[in-house]
């Protein structure tokens, strides 16, 4: 079994399309409006943005959360929690051994919280 799709609330599809295109560095894969569906591809998992979806907390991998947050701040994105180490991987159960897991949280254009995650060498 594998994850196929994640749905996230978006009141304004055009605004959400711009925000997520900039955040993900990729354009939407498909837009169906009506009925108001916007899809991005996250390495084989569809991210569906639609007005009828509930708000979800999604976590996105970024190369370096510290640099990502700095760039997002410069673009005026609201930073909810600054980058911080939340876990050190001593073994490979949840991430590469010898790395620290960094997280930060931002608010997207639709008011949803989005987590940004990096696993960086100590």
Image: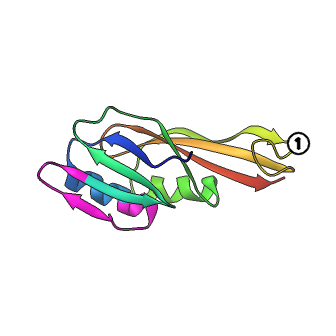
Query: Residue at the spot x=63%, y=43% of the render?
Result: 103
Q: How many marks?
A: 1
Considering depth in this image, is 95 or 79 the residue closer to the camera? 95
Dot 1: within a 10 Å radius of its alpha carbon, few (fewer than 14), some, or many (20 or more) residues? few
Q: Which residue is mark 1?
A: 90
Location of residue 3 in the rendering, given as x and y in whole percent from the top left corner: 51, 46
Left or right: 91 in relation to 118 = right
Left or right: 55 in relation to 45 = left
Location of residue 67 in the rendering, given as x and y in whole percent from the top left corner: 60, 59
Location of residue 65 in the rendering, given as x and y in whole percent from the top left corner: 61, 53
Q: Quadrant of the N terminus?
A: top right
Q: From what the image shows, is residue 98 above or below residue 93?
A: below
Outermost residue toward the left in this view: 34
Outermost residue toward the front in this view: 1
Q: How is the image coloured?
A: rainbow
Left or right: 105 in relation to 41 = right
Outermost residue toward the bottom in this view: 26
Query: Residue at the spot x=23%, y=51% of the render?
Result: 37
Left or right: 32 in relation to 61 = left
**Does residue 30 show up magenta in the picture?**
yes
In the rendered structure, which segment of residues is drawn in magenta?
21-37
* Rendered image quadrant of residue 68: bottom right
Query: Residue at the spot x=66%, y=52% of the render?
Result: 118
**Does residue 6 show up magenta in the picture?**
no
* Rendered image quadrant of residue 52: top left
Badge 1 marks a residue whose secondary structure is: loop
Location of residue 48 in the rendering, given as x and y in whole percent from the top left corner: 33, 49
Query: Residue at the spot x=42%, y=60% of the render?
Result: 41
């Amino acid at each position: 079994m594998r994850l196929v799709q994640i749905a996230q609330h978006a009141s304004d599809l055009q605004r959400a399309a711009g925000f997520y295109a900039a955040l993900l560095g990729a354009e939407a894969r498909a837009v169906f409006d009506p009925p108001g569906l916007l899809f991005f591809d996250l390495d084989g998992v569809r991210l569906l943005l639609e007005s009828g979806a509930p708000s979800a907390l999604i976590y996105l991998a970024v190369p370096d959360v510290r640099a990502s947050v700095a760039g997002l701040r410069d673009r005026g994105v609201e930073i909810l929690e600054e980058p911080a180490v939340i876990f050190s991987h001593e073994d490979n159960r949840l991430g590469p051994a010898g790395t620290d897991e960094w997280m930060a949280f931002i608010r997207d254009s639709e008011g949803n919280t989005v987590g940004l995650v990096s696993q960086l060498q100590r």
